[in-house]
Image: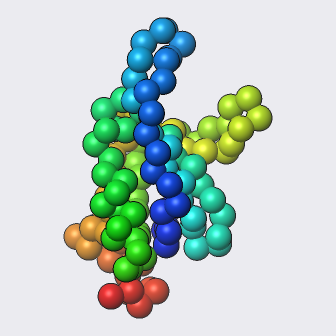
Amino acid sequence: MLSDKLLQYLMAKVRTLSNKIQSRRIVKLIDLSRQIVELSLYGIRATEFNGEAVYTSGQDQPIIAIFVGTLYKAYKGVGPFLSGTTACRWYINNGEIAEIYEFYNRYAIS
């Protein structure tokens, strides 16, 4: 996903269906077509994602992010959204990844 704006990066504790408490972070992004995409991160991934740093960086430059290991879902009429658990990883403005470097060149992002 190529995102030029991070809208929110809220985190809360939620109770799972198995009655366990875990962290959940909802990240709202805007893609190049101005569509809002919601990403829900759970557990350790919710706490590892540094939403404040990404948000701050996005105020000065576009954010190019690759999220891997996510599922595209719709739940009880809500969605679609991306869901990320322990398998989820992200690469944000990482110029060493060829695809991100190509986006920088394609859109003349410096």
**Can you see residue 77?**
yes
Name the residue at the top extreme.
18
In this rendering, position of residue 4 left or right of residue 36: left
Q: Position of residue 45 (x, y in %)?
A: 34, 38
In this rendering, position of residue 16 left or right of residue 66: right
In this rendering, position of residue 41 left or right of residue 100: right
Q: Position of residue 61 (x, y in %)?
A: 38, 79
Q: Quadrant of the C terminus?
A: bottom left
In this rendering, position of residue 104 left or right of residue 39: left
**Can you see residue 99?**
no
Q: Residue at x 41, y 17 (%)?
A: 21
Q: Residue at x 49, y 9 (%)?
A: 18
Above or below for 22 versus 46: above
21, 107: nearer the viewer: 21
Q: Residue at x 37, y 54 (%)?
A: 51
Above or below for 14 versus 47: above
